[in-house]
Image (cartoon, grey):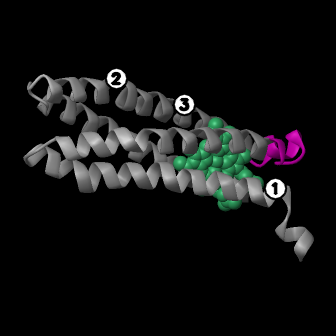
Amino acid sequence: MWVHLADVRLVVLWIHLVGAVVWIGGLAYQTHVLLPGARRGDPRPFADAARRARPVTWTAVALVVLSGFYNVTQLGPLERVLQSGAGLMLAAKFTLVIVAVALAAQRDFAQLPILDAAIRGGGDATRALTAVGRLDRVVLLLAVVVIYLGLAVSRA
Ligand code: HEM
């Protein structure tokens, strides 16, 4: 039992899932709980929270991706992976993850600085908030599909 509990594969899978929960959970909270308030009134609390969330988010993204690559190495014989359909689902998952990461980067490193500049300069924050909201919805949508594909790959 102890050998199983300390299994590297299990620990890495745990990192994979905790990383996904932190990334996607944090995003859902920001966009569904904090963002509506920013759009109705003062955008500053949201901008502060989004900036503070960035190191947590990107640490989680790095852990999810690195542990994901390790998971791939543990799937077993290539022939079986291809035959079971896991290979195809993994390719689809990987593609969606790349798109999601690119959109998340656009949000965090392009739109958030634009939002900050608008707030500091006393300008209109609405456009940046709208852009962040759109990007977040797409990333969340991709994430729910990615989670399904992850579950399907591990059970194929
Ligand atoms: C480059 C990125 C990624 C790669 C290469 C990858 C790879 C994998 C692999 C190979 C598995 C199967 C593990 C096993 O059966 O032992 C897996 C499981 C899983 N992944 Fe990923 N993944 C990546 C990103 C993500 C992301 C971004 C999420 C969520 C947002 C995610 C969620 C899951 C889930 C929920 C499982 C199912 C775990 C289980 O049922 O045991 N993965 N991943």
Q: CA distance from mark 3 to mark 2?
A: 17 Å
Residue 130 in the image: above or below residue 106: below
Dot 3 beta carbon under 8 Å from ligand 1: yes
SS class of the residue under badge 2?
A: helix
Which label belongs to residue 98?
A: 3
| Residue name at image x 25 percent, y 56 percent | 33
In the current view of this chain or complex, which residue is farthest to the front?
Answer: 120
Q: Amino acid at mark 3?
A: Ile
Q: Amino acid at mark 1?
A: Arg
Question: Of discs 1 and 2, which sits in the foreground?
Answer: 2
SS class of the residue under badge 1?
A: helix
Quadrant that contains the N terminus: bottom right
The stretch of residues the image draws in magenta is: 73-84
Residue 68 in the image: above or below residue 14: above
Q: Is residue 82 magenta?
A: yes
| Residue name at image x 56 percent, y 41 percent | 59
Residue at the disc numbered 1: 9
Q: Is residue 126 visible?
A: yes
Dot 1 beta carbon under 8 Å from ligand 1: yes
Left or right of residue 71: residue 108? left
Residue at the disc numbered 2: 110
Q: Amino acid at mark 2?
A: Ala
Dot 2 beta carbon under 8 Å from ligand 1: no
Question: Residue 23 at what x, y percent from top left?
Answer: 49, 48
